[in-house]
Image: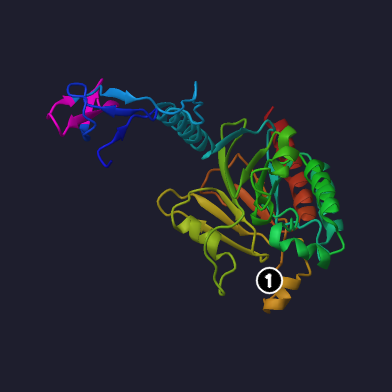
Amino acid sequence: MNDIRTDTDGNIIGCHECGARALKKDGWHYYGGNEDKKQRWKCTACGKNTLYPKVLEPAPFRPKERPIEFAPIEELIDHRNKLYNRKKQYKQKTRLHDIEININGPIGIAHFGDPHVDDDGTDLSMIMQYSDAINNTEGMFAGNLGDIQNNWIGRLSFLYGQQSTSAKESWRLTEYFVNKIDWLYLVAGNHDVWSGEGDPLDFIMRDHKGIYEKWGARLNLIFPNGKEIRVNARHMFKGVSMWNTAHGVAKAVQMGWRDHILTCGHIHVSGYQVLKDPASGLISHALQVGSFKIFDNYAEKLGLDDRNIFNCPVTIIDPTYDDDDNRLITTIFDPLEGAEFLKFKREKWKKSRKKRK
């Protein structure tokens, strides 16, 4: 019985010469390269080899058609290669987003730290006040460093019971806030990406012209006079220090990121450093931005010190200066003061332009 063999249809097969059922597998016969192959058999009775054994007894039953659930391996490989190439192309194009600035003269960028708009400890009136100031100031843009709301998901959903805002109300606040500003960039933080692939922020941002990326976005701002300013915005740069609250973002500069502005949030502390590349003379502004969550139960529980000094610094860019000139970028830690300073800079620029004419 051990010598009885069947084909893929369940038919009992035997030697095509002597008719014996004594067949054993004898390797593969390859044709058309190494992709196509057929089982080779050897009869242990007469010693003959064959690729086409004789059907001795038909199978008791055989489906007329056996549906195939999966694609052929060649089709699967081709599909995987196309997906990889598409992802590779996307990643290459999004390493640095080119953005044309269509406003002459100085501009400002207000960098919102973690808003957490639905948290009971968040100063929502401050968020709205800053948003209005940005919208009412010529040349002022805004970016968002993530964690727009708490977004308690899965095993953390019980935390909605510890705040007065429901999940539905949280998304209403989020949508209102996101649509209130025409964002230059918006970065999803860890609270935001907890939503998974069905990302509501992706849907909310669908009509916005600005850049929306998970974790981080790097922008190349191209001004009308040809000046280019690189902004590297992440939810977090790796590295923390008890001695320097801007350690992570400053370390990114020292480790090789040659950008004019680097900014991040996440840890709800504030810090600022200005660094200069000795080789090129490029001056980098490293900003660790705090949060609008002023009262933080989690921080109190862990006994963390309050180092939340500024939550929406403004970087004023004057594209008439060179990379090694400290007047190229001015950092103002309060957005209302930043708006006033930007108005002053733009008026000064307009007057100088009239004189040149």
Specify the quadrant that holds the C terminus.
top right
Residue 35 or residue 45, whichever sits in front: 45
Residue 90, position in %: x, y? 52, 34
Q: Horizontal placement of 301 versus 64: left or right? A: right
User: Image point 51% across, 58% down: which residue?
Assistant: 275
Residue 323 makes an appearance in the image: yes
Q: Horizontal placement of 79 versus 181: left or right? A: left
Residue 137 makes an appearance in the image: no
Residue 265 or residue 29, whichever sits in front: 29
Count of marks, rendered view: 1
Relative to 107, residue 129 above or below:
below
Residue farthest toward the bottom in the current orientation of the protein: 303
Residues drawn in magenta: 28-49
| Three-letter amino acid code of the residue under disc 1 | Arg
Residue 175, position in %: x, y? 80, 44
User: Image point 65% across, 33% down: which residue?
Assistant: 101
Residue 285 or residue 200, whichever sits in front: 200
The question of residue 154 being in magenta is answered with no
Residue 248, position in %: x, y? 54, 62
User: Image point 54% across, 65% down: which residue?
Assistant: 247
Residue 119 or residue 144, whichever sits in front: 119
**Residue that carries the numbered disc 1 in the rendered image:** 307
